[in-house]
Image (tube, rainbow, N blue to C red):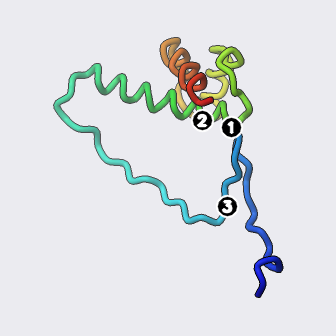
Amino acid sequence: MPAAATKPKPTQSTARRPVPLDLPYEPVAKCPLPPGRPREWYITHNRRLKAMRLAIALLDSGVYAPNQAHNAMIRITAQLIGVHPPSDTTCHMVRALIRYSR
């Protein structure tokens, strides 16, 4: 069959690029965090993960500038995606990630 006669694959638009829907995405297996680190390391690690999840959700919803992401908007987004409300430090980290995503 000629290439022109085939249908294009359906895509779902994320913020800036189309993503094919039929790729076999498998969730990454979770493994325990390494033991023996100082407590502050675990706190920072989990804060970075939460900030990354929130920044991705905000970028997907159309927030592309840090000045658009106020603490209230970040906390509403956290509620929508099902994570605990972030602290002011985490909100600051989310804005930094959005700033560097451009």
Residue beneath disc 2: 56
Asked if the residues shown at circle 1 and circle 2 are in contact, with their CB atoms under 8 angstroms apart, the answer is: yes
> What is the distance, in whole Å, between disc 1 and disc 3 at their CAs?
16 Å
Name which residue type carries label 1.
Asp
Q: Is residue 98 left or right of residue 73?
A: left
Q: For mark 3, what is the residue?
A: 21
- Residue 13 higher or lower than 67, as above or below: below
Measured Cα–Cα span from mark 1 to mark 2: 6 Å
Instruction: Give the residue at mark 1.
Output: 60
For the residues labelled 1 and 3, say whether their Cβ atoms are less than 8 Å apart: no
Would you place residue 54 above or below residue 40 in this image?
A: below
Quadrant where the image shows the C terminus: top right
Q: Is residue 92 above or below residue 12?
A: above
Q: Looking at numbered disc 3 in the image, what kind of residue is underneath it? A: Leu
Residue found 43% across the figure and 53% down from its top:
28
Q: Nearer the viewer, residue 89 or 83?
A: 89
